[in-house]
Amino acid sequence: MYLALKEMRRARVRFGLLAGAVGLLVYLILFQQAISTGLIDQFIGALKNQSADVLVYNAQARRNLEGSIVLPEQSAAIAEVEGVAVAAPLGEGTFTVVAGDPDADEQDAVIFGYQLGGPGEPTTLTAGRLPERTGEAVASSRNAADGFDVGDTVTVVPNAGGTATSFTVVGLAEEINYSVAPTLFTDFVGYDAARRAVNPDATDVLPSVVAVHVAEGADPAEVAEAITAAVDGTEALTRQQAVDESPGVSAVRQSFSVILLLFYLVAPLVTGLFFLIVTFQKAGALTLLRAIGAPAGLLVRSLVVQVAAVVVSGAAVAVGLFWLTTRTVIGSISVPFDLGAIGFTVGLVLVLALVTSLAAIRRVLRIEPIAATTGAGVHL
Amino acid sequence: MGLATTELRRRPGRFAVATVVLTFFSLLLLLLGGLLDGLFLGSTGAIRAQDADVIVYSSTARDSFLRSRLGSDVRAEVEAVPGVADVGGLGFTLLGATVPGENELADVAVAGYELPPTGVPEPPPAGHAWADRRLEDAGVSIGDTLLVGPSATPIVVDGWVEDTNYLQQGALWTTLDTWRTVQNANRPDAFVPDGVVQVLVVRGDGDLAASIDAATGSTSTLSVDDAVYALPGVASQQSTFNAIIFATLAVVLAVVALFFSLLTLERTGLYGVLKAIGASTARLFGGVVLQAVVVALVAFVAGGLLAWAADAALPGGIPLQLTVSRYVFTFVALIAAAVLGSAVSLRRVTRIDPASAIGSAA
């Protein structure tokens, strides 16, 4: 151990560069994992944390809430499908609002309109209460400080000819953002008013989807299949399917998976190959150590200590950088500092680094002490 | 230099480690850049193609096309602004479309226009459209009648245009009237009466943005470049991906520095001998840099081929787009990182004392 640490102290630049490279790679892994998770959660949190068992889209919308409208005859037919206990409208739209201080800058907000007490209400209330009448709303807790706290008023900025519509925030719910914007859940009448405020020419305000509570004992997946089969031009999805199959979510997951896989390969590869070269260069000294009685186990342990020291010190740098990153908001996405995920990542990189160091360990184990007596003829 | 290239030729195994690692980095940089380009180009084509100086939104829309609405009264005010030469309406509707003979719907952006964007012909007859070639992947052919949206509004495809997509959806360029028909049939909550458009594209001279906003009092006017970056997520994607790409380049630099300092360390004795027989430090260092550049070049070629294979193998949902400019950027960045990284060895090469080095080598 003493030799291992002393060698690292003497070759600070070499080991420092390696630890720095590993640190940056681990930081990039942590950052991208967090961005991916944060992006997905803040894109579709509203779908994930609402109470409907099944959401019925217009099939033409390709599971895109923004592009879906359910026609009146479809809504009526959905309610008649076996296994459907309650079917109610759920509308979604993005609006320009003034939140909190009436003199505040305008900002974007997503408004969900649901039937009060029916399917589609937020399920992660952390403060206040659910809306009980038109004009009340639950807001995403993440945006409380942006004018969406309990007691704040949020006003939809009307277009020419429209009438301003306001909502009073009566509750906050966790992880209900949609499209990374501040999000409000209000009743469908309020949503209808918001739609007409920005488009006074609207001929009708149709629900984006129909939110369904299934009958007691019914399987949401089976009910969803039954709705899709029974009602022409619709596609019914369970809540989880709606989350997983939202446009962009699977693409984001797949894209980041490919990139992260490469980063997870590169970090231990750099470490393993570095130690392989160093072991090769130290072959003479290691042979001599073996010849004067140092057991192979000691040399292997020294190598393992160096690998662990490099990864752990690199990880410390990475966690520090990542902590600083989580203090800021990246493009409107806040990055969570999740200790569990950090521990898993560092542990996995360490294990992979040790695995890739097996080549160096194998070379150490193949050293023949007798070779020291033959002078320069050290073969590894 | 001859020695450096001879070593590369005779003992390629010595450089295999650095080459393999840099190949992975090259692949990573190309995939990261390809994703960024895919997201950017697929989202912004319709705006980048606008042959205009500025784009005018309603002031309440926060520079969002889909939320902006401008009536004929505002259009008249804009047309009267000094310096304004041409004004055209523009509107988008994002919908699914049924393609003849296909089971899967196509994601389309129906775009109504008056002033033709670059590469788009004059508006086609009512009910017809020029389709972005991306829709070919969804099974669309010239002459097809697409049934757009829940109301199945028919649109006939008359021909192809290139790189004009909007928010990752294939654009269908049609007349403003056809766009209004599609919008009103499929989005009654976003009904657009005659004369209303989402935005105005304007050609002209002078400080158009300030003049137009001052004249109307109800608009927000952006240059085309600013309009591109005002699209949802575009600016955030650019900054996030660029940060990751440049951090990855920093790692490449550290890794090159690491491997070449190890190689230099290994060759201290050899360099001592070479110095003793007259080789200059500059010549020896030049050899190290040349080797780093060759390693980076080989890694770039291997990484480029792997990226190309990945592009072909990855599912179509991943918006990966490998462009020539991305290859050029990655090549230049890798070479620059290799040169800078190998420069770490300069100090060690400079400090080699021929006499002591020969002694230790012996």
Image (tube, rainbow, N blue to C red):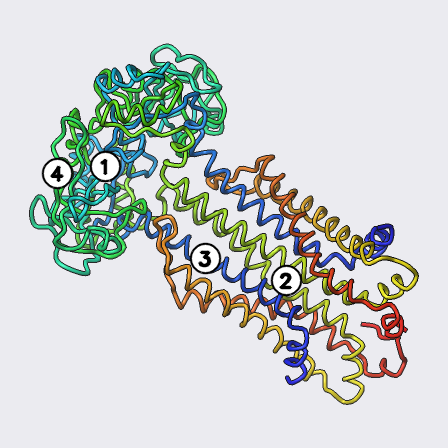
- From the image, state whether disc 1 or disc 2 is nearer to you: 2
Residue A58 x/y as whole percent: 27, 34
Mark 2 vs mark 3, CA separation in Å? 19 Å
Q: What residue is shown with label 2?
A: A270
Answer with left or right where residue B361 lies relative to residue B152: right
Circle 3/circle 4 CB separation < 8 Å: no
Q: Dividing the image into 4 quarters, which one contains the C terminus of chain A?
A: bottom right
- Whether residue A120 is situated above or below residue A297 in the rendered picture: above
Q: Earlier in the sequence, mark 2 or mark 3?
A: 3
Labels 1 and 2 in the same subunit: yes
Of circles 2 and 4, the one toward us is 4
Q: Secondary structure at mark 3?
A: helix
Q: Which residue is mark 1?
A: A208
Between discs 1 and 2, the one toward the N terminus: 1
Q: Is residue B16 left or right of residue B89?
A: right
Say which residue appears at 25% left-offset and 53% top-offset: A143
For mark 1, name the chain. A
Q: Amino acid at mark 1?
A: Ser
Q: Which mark is residue A31?
A: 3
Q: Position of residue B45 (x, y in %)?
A: 45, 29
The answer to the question of whether label 1 and label 3 lie on touching residues, with beta carbons closer than 8 A, is no
Q: What residue sits right under mark 4 in the picture? A: A165
Q: Is residue B5 visible?
A: yes
What amino acid is found at the position of numbered circle 3 in the picture?
A: Phe
The numbered mark, 4 or 1, whose residue comes first in the sequence reads 4
Identify the residue shown where x is 68% and y is 55%: B20
Label 1 and label 3: CA atoms lie apart by: 34 Å
Label 3 vs label 4: CA separation?
39 Å
**Label 1's element?**
loop
Question: How much space separates mark 4 and mark 1, taking CA atoms?
Answer: 20 Å
Residue at the left extreme? Answer: A133
| Label 3 crowd bin: few (<14), some (14–19), many (20+), radius 10 Å | many
